[in-house]
Amino acid sequence: MRIRTIGLFALLMLAWTWTVQAQHKPTHEEQHRMDEAQGHQAEADHHQLTCDCTPKEDSVFNTAKVAFHHIGDANAFHIWGDLYFPLPVMLYAPGEGWTTMMSTRFDYAHNHGNGRKAINRYVMVEGVVYRVADVQFPSEEVAIDCVTEVEHDGESHPAIVYKGQCYPLESKTTWDGGMMGGGTTSFMDFSITKNVFTMLLVFALLWWMFSAVRKAYQKHPNQAPKGLQNLVETIIVFIQEEVAKPFIGKHYFRFMPFLTALFFFILALNLIGQIPFFPGSGNLTGNISVTAALALITFFRVNLVGNRHYWQHIFWMPGVPAAIKFILTPVEILGLFIKPFTLMLRLFANITAGHIVLISFVGLIFVFGKMGENLLGASIGVVTAFLLNSFMMAIELLVALIQAFVFTLLTASYLGDATQEAHH
Amino acid sequence: MNVLFLSGFTVIRPEPGLLFWTIVIFIVFWLTIGKGIIKMITDMLREREEGIQRSLDEAKRVREEMQQLQAENQEILAKAQEERVQILAEAKAAKDNIISEAREQAKEEARKIINTAKEQIENMKMGAVIELKNQVGRIALEVATKVLEKDLSKEDEQVKFVEKLVSEMDLN
């Protein structure tokens, strides 16, 4: 027990150091100063940064942009045309506090998801909340001229025009340390976004399904299963016999709730993302935050049940020469983090890739049709996209199952390693 | 900022909000459905599995018992069969015995009767012979008497006869 505690403590210390060093995140005050500097810079710049409200027509269909927009998270759930499902917005700006309201207050519904109002410097661009970087911008609710784009560093960034002046926007804080194009900004988004809403929906659906199954078990105990009960039981038995028993061994029963919950959760999220219309279409397991959360939970679950034998193997591998141990121990410690990291990446990459391919095939319609100019091209695009997507969606269903299975299987294997008895 | 991906590729950036909500929702899911309903289902499955195993064992045991019982029955039947054959054989032997005994007795009886009859016949025959002898004797005597009466009236004749008798007696 003591070894376990020490091991975990050492691990946490390592993780903490690693995170701090890897991200080299500026502290809060530093950030604030940077923001202010940026703000002043922006204020000084806005005469140079020019943008206006003349609508820019894209001459070429930008498949990547459309794909990224569709797989991304949003603060408004687009249903059809001008119809949006309203979602609550909960924004937290460190040092300033919370801003909570319904997203409908941005008045975006008849404007392609672009808000007509700025509230506490927050605005909505294509269904996603952004914030005016300039701290001089009025913090009360104001009507903005329009949402537009500004060219900066060779890329176009979202911006707004307010009283004829151009204000660049910043997106919500992301924890990628700037490596993936995000970074720490002045606010965090804790809203019930499209993804969170979908996840709650999946939770409700699974709750309903499992309640029905439980009723079936209580009504006919010790009888052959039927219908939905049979389906659920088949999956549970599969996880028990093919995943838990072979990979964990003696203690498998203890981890059955975790493994089964993990499998059903991931599978349901994968599948709901395959439905191309409301209330589906939320790309959850193709979002690294979701897979990171699941990997993090797995990481803690595995290392919290790790026994003396497990920690001994990591910090001082028995049965190898001491010289080798000095090489092996850092590798093992790295392995602790690499394991959940690969879990996170594998699921994310598989699902995201599938979604991008599907959207790209749909994009063929617009590419072939030259944005509606060429009807014949569009028709050919429709047929091609239909055939290719029929095939892709079948593959995606398979991928949804396989990735849920692989995540569960690897988790079981890590749990098995952590709870294995000494065998020397 | 060294951007590795296109600016619009937001899904690769871990963001605190979604991370937080996923952790919360998954943990609630795990603790309620996982530890509640799924635990109940796996418990029930295990119980059912054990129940099925018990039933199978029971069936096997009962079948074995049945087989044993059947074997016993077979044995009893075989024994009965054997006994029947034996009894039949005994009965047949007894029958044969009785018949042969009766036959013997009958034979004996018949022989006795025949013997008695024979004896009687013999007796009667003897009686008849004796009577015949007696009669023959008597007749002979009478004849002799008559002959004698006739021949022995003369002297010389008597002497001749006696001499003859005597000579005959010597020859004996």
Image (cartoon, rainbow, N blue to C red):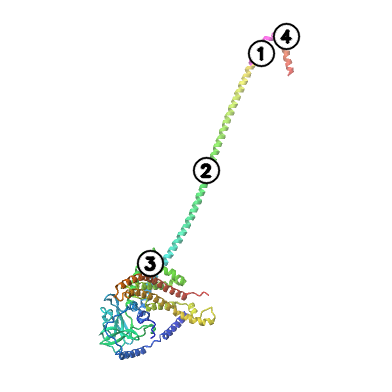
Residues in magenta, as a range: B138-154
Residue, disc 1: B144
Q: Amino acid at mark 4?
A: Asp
Vertical relation: B160 (above or below) A414:
above
Image-quadrant location for residue A343: bottom left
Residue, disc 4: B156
Marks 2 and 1, how far apart at CA: 80 Å
Residue, disc 3: A231
Crowd band around label 3 with a 10 angstrom C-alpha radius: few (<14), some (14–19), many (20+): few
The residue lying toward the viewer, choosing from A326 and B86, is A326
Chain ID of residue with mark 2: B
Q: Is residue B89 left or right of residue B24?
A: right
Residue, disc 2: B88
Image-quadrant location for residue A303: bottom left
Mark earlier in primary sequence (1, 4): 1
Q: Amino acid at mark 2?
A: Leu
Chain ID of residue with mark 1: B
| Both marks 4 and 2 on one chain | yes
Marks 1 and 4, how far apart at CA: 18 Å
